[in-house]
Image (spheres, rainbow, N blue to C red):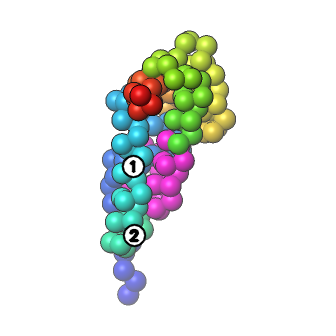
């Protein structure tokens, strides 16, 4: 008899091809927690992941979340140039860049809402 896959409900620790909620300004902390989480889930034999947003999948959802956070932070860092906020034009450009990264563009309102908190987080970290 085949055993059932080990599943975990991760809430917003992982997302699957939707924009993440980064308005709390803790994207760096979120990113730091993903690799240890992925390692622990592998150790436990977890094969099914139910994310906070998007369709369920496997552990690849954690890697996708990492790549999303890295892309978002890089785009904000490039646009903000050390400032703690983005202009309306920069937010439009951020939306364009993130739509190129995530053509499905699900939950696009999170991009502009998260722009200034992430810019402030990155500016603070640089000082």
Residue 66 forms part of the magenta stretch: yes
Q: 47 or 40: which is nearer to us? A: 40
Q: Is residue 101 above or below residue 41?
A: above
User: In the image as oriented, which residue stretches furthest toward the front?
Assistant: 127
State the residue in front, 51 or 60. 60
- Magenta region: 50-69
Asked which secondary structure carries label 2, the reply is helix
Residue 95 visible? The answer is: no
**Residue 103 place in picture, x, y as percent:** 64, 37
Q: Is residue 22 magenta?
A: no
Task: Measure the alpha-carbon separation of dots 2 and 1.
Answer: 17 Å
Q: Residue at x 61, y 39 (%)?
A: 102
Identified at 57% across, 40% down, the residue is 71
To which quarter of the image does residue 84 belong? top left
Q: Nearer the viewer, residue 78 or 11?
A: 78
Q: Which residue is mark 1?
A: 32
**Residue 37, can we see it?**
yes
Give the residue at x 54% y 47%. Answer: 67
Mark positioned earlier in the residue sequence (2 or 1): 1
Residue at the far bottom in the pictured view: 1
Q: Mark 2 — residue? A: 42
- Badge 1 element: helix
Q: Look at the image and tell me in which quarter the C terminus lies.
A: top left
Point 50% across, 27% down: residue? 111
The local crowd at label 1, few if under 14, some if 14 to 19, many if 20 or more residues have their Cα within 10 Å, is few
Residue 97 coordinates in the image, percent (x, y): 64, 31
Q: Compared with residue 5, is residue 60 higher up or lower down, i.e. above or below?
A: above
Q: Residues within 10 Å of mark 2 (few under 14, many from 20)?
A: few
């Amino acid at each position: 008899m085949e055993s059932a896959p080990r599943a975990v409900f991760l809430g917003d620790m992982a997302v699957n091809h939707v924009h993440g909620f980064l308005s709390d300004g803790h994207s760096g902390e979120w990113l730091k927690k993903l690799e240890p989480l992925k390692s622990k889930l592998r150790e436990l034999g977890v094969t099914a992941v139910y994310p906070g947003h998007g369709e369920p999948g496997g552990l690849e959802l954690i890697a996708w979340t990492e790549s999303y956070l890295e892309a978002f932070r890089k785009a904000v860092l490039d646009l903000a140039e050390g400032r703690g906020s983005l202009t309306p034009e920069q937010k439009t450009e951020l939306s364009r860049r993130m739509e190129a990264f995530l053509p499905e563009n699900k939950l696009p309102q999170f991009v502009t809402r998260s722009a200034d908190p992430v810019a402030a987080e990155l500016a603070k970290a640089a000082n």
